[in-house]
Structure formats: C-alpha cells, structure tokens
Image (tube, rainbow, N blue to C red):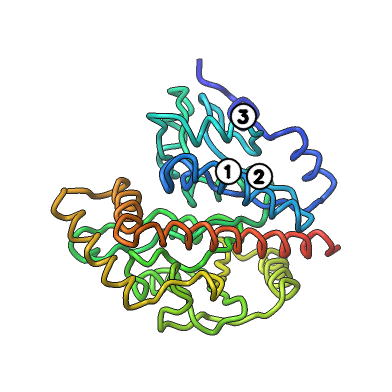
Amino acid sequence: MAPAHIESLLEIDAGLRAALERGGPVVALESAVITHGMPYPNNLAMAQAVEDVVRAEGATPATIAILRGRLRVGLDSALLEHLASGCGIGKASRRDIASLLVRGETAGTTVAATMLAAALAGIRVFATGGIGGVHRGAKDTFDISADLSELASTPVAAVCAGAKSILDIPKTLEYLETHGVAVLGYGTDEFPAFFARTSGHPVDYRFDTPRQLAEVIAAHRAIGLRGGILIANPIPEADALPGAAMESQIAAACRDADAAGVSRKDLTPFLLKRINELTGGDSLKANIALIKNNAVLAARVAVELSRMP
C-alpha cells in the first residue's frame, strides 16, 4: 500500500528540526552538485566546507537528498560520504521525486527538487552554485531547466552566482521576468555569469546588505506573493575566470556535447566536466569558491530573517 502521509516520505534531521521549531536560521543546500557536479573526493571536501561556512555564520546547514526512498533534509557526515563516493546514484528534479521515493532509490537533488523539499520543511533560504536555465539552442531543443519554473512557484529565496555560464543568460532572465521572479543583485547592478562576475545584463534591483535582502524576502511573503526570489551574488573577484576565455571553453564543450549526442539531464554534468578538463581544473576551483561564497551570504540572510518578528 502506498504511504498516506508526508511524514512517511520526508525525514528531517532531529537537530535541524529543533532549529526550525525555535525559529533559528537554516540554509538549504543541494546535493546534485555532490553526486553529479564534481569528482570524488573534491565533492565531499566541498560539501563539508560549505556546511562549515554556514555554521560559522551562525546558521544551521540542511543538505537535502533522496536516500533509500526518503526525502532527507539534513545529512550527517556518513550520509555525505555515501553521496560523494557512491556509484549509480541518480539525479532528481521535481518530476523524479515521487517515482524515486516509491522505488526506494537514492539521488542527489537539483535546485528544483531542493527548493521543493526546503519549502516542505519550512526552510526559507537556499544556497547553490548557479541555477539552471534556458540552454543554448533552446529554440530548437526546447531545453529549459525545471529550476526556473520552481523559482516561479516555490516560496524559497535562492542565493546563486547567477545562471551557469553554459546557458543562454538573456533568455533565462526573460523567462524569470515573464514568470514574475524578482532577480536581486547583491552588491551588483549586473547579473553574474557563474565563473565570471558580469554578464552584460542587469538585475531587477540591487541591495548591498543581507538585512535588506531579508527584508525583501519578508515583505514578499507578507503580501502573499507566490514563488521564490533569486539573489545573484557574484563570484569573489580573486576567484573569477576571464569571461572571454571561458566563453571559448564553453563553446568547445558545447560542440563536444553535440558530437557525443549528450542532451537533457545529462547535459549539464557533461559540460561542467568537460569545461573543467579544458581549463586544467581552474573551473572546479572557481566552482567551489563561488558555492562557499553563496553559502556565506545565504547564512547571513537567514540570520537576519530569524531576527525579524
């Protein structure tokens, strides 16, 4: 017989549940970047470091994944190790969640799936590297990430370093505007492009303090606006990669993907892996740096939210 209640499918770590019940600051973290975004053991070191920076800012990290048929919110060190080192682990977006739960499988959660789980658990702030978006060539392939529709429907604020630079950024921003998702720049007037600090495209509004961002989130919820908020946080200047050089590497990786016939959910992991090879590992270092930077900002925003009545 199928499970009848959300409690049988959603498992929240006891310490995390206590933090939520007392109104403490909590930051949701995705796990697809662990299972599909980086090689082992870099992925494990990254996951541990990101959780550590969230704690250092006074918030509680909540890494989210599907583990043996349960949606787990908050993972201990053994479970992080299992995700990072395991073979044959799936990748779950919104459409995959119910099927994977019924089949008892394990998967890393994408931005879309993590946001959904965070909302179910009552977590308001989420940190990731870069969101998915409209892929290059989407006019022919219709390849548009479910991350965008999730941002339009799920009330969680996502802190990111912009959209992954393998995407069509202008069309991604147009999609977000059409679906009423506010794009806020933290200390920037320009939407960042993941590895690069700028993309040439403006954000909707700029804010310069975590407190201001928290106030926008609170106002957004107070008046009952549906959907989430996207907070664009540029990669630190010391870790950014030259935009022109990266564009050349991305174009080469896209050609390689076309030649190999890679598409749909396999495309982003393939491109990130290929770009890392083409940059001699520089893109991986930048990826780790920007994820940690986003986690710091998300924790500071969560702390400010927790201080509001």
Q: CA distance from mark 3 to mark 2?
A: 15 Å
Task: Point out the residue furthest to the left here.
Answer: 259
- Image coordinates of residue 301 in percent, x first then y, are 71, 64
Name the residue beneath numbered marker 1.
117
Q: Is residue 19 left or right of residue 10?
A: right
Q: Which one is nearer the viewer's eye here, 257 or 301?
A: 257
Residue drawn at x 56%, y 48% as measured from the top left: 46
Q: Amino acid at mark 3?
A: Ala
Q: Which one is nearer the viewer's eye here, 183 or 289?
A: 289
- Image coordinates of residue 238 in percent, x first then y, are 54, 73
Q: Helix or strand or loop: what does disc 3 sit on? A: helix
Q: Amino acid at mark 1?
A: Ala
Residue drawn at x 40%, y 53% as measured from the top left: 146
Which label number is shown at residue 78? 3
Residue drawn at x 32%, y 74% as measured from the top left: 245
Q: Say few, some or many: other residues with alpha carbon within 10 Å of mark 2 (under 14 / 14 to 19 / 20 or more).
A: many
Q: CA distance from mark 3 to mark 1?
A: 21 Å
- Image coordinates of residue 291 in percent, x first then y, are 55, 58
Name the residue beneath numbered marker 2.
62
Q: Helix or strand or loop: what does disc 2 sit on? A: strand
Task: Point out the residue furthest to the front here.
Answer: 280
